Amino acid sequence: MTLLFHPFEIAAIGLSVLATAIVVLDGESNWVEGLQLLALYAILGLAFYFLPADIVAGAGGPAPPGFTCLLPFAIPRRGWRRSW
């Protein structure tokens, strides 16, 4: 794994850190703030699911063989086992 990140990945991490900092800053939370964090996670998950894998994989390189999309965790095409 390289440290070459697509700008979309960097923006997603930055947005997540910003949203979490805003929620944690006051020292209290309620159900609305939790719902906002869950909504942000769902939006980012959907965005990474529908983003073409060849755009994000390796900062513009081809997608790794055996993977269908780039989620926070990659789902292999042939079940959950990897053939190492």
Image (cartoon, rainbow, N blue to C red):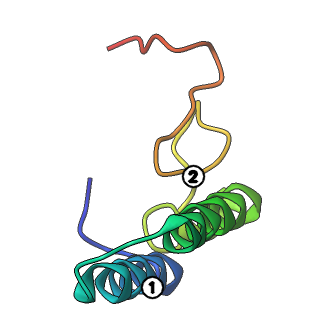
The local secondary structure at tag 2 comes to loop
Percent from the top left, x then y, of residue 57? 50, 61
The local secondary structure at tag 1 comes to helix
Residue name at image x 57 percent, y 57 percent: 62
Percent from the top left, x then y, of residue 2? 25, 62
Label 2 neighbourhood size at 10 Å, few (<14), some (14-19), many (20+)? many
Sequence-wise, the earlier of marks 2 and 1 is: 1
The image shows residue 46, relative to residue 68, as above or below, that is below
Q: Residue 66 sits in which quadrant?
A: top right
How many tags in the picture? 2
Residue at the spot of label 1: 15
Amino acid at circle 2:
Leu
Spatial separation of the CA atoms under disc 2 and disc 1: 18 Å
**Mark toward the viewer: 2 or 1:** 1
Amino acid at circle 1:
Leu
The image shows residue 75, relative to residue 45, as above or below, that is above
**Which sits in the foreground, 14 or 50?**
14
Residue at the spot of label 2: 70
Percent from the top left, x then y, of residue 64? 51, 44
The image shows residue 78, relative to residue 28, as above or below, that is above
Label 1 neighbourhood size at 10 Å, few (<14), some (14-19), many (20+)? some
Q: Residue 29 sits in which quadrant?
A: bottom left
Location of the C terminus by quadrant is top left
Residue name at image x 27 percent, y 79 percent: 24
Label drawn at residue 42: none
Determine whether, in the image, residue 42 is placed left or right of residue 58. right
Percent from the top left, x then y, of residue 43? 68, 68
Q: Residue 36 sits in which quadrant?
A: bottom right
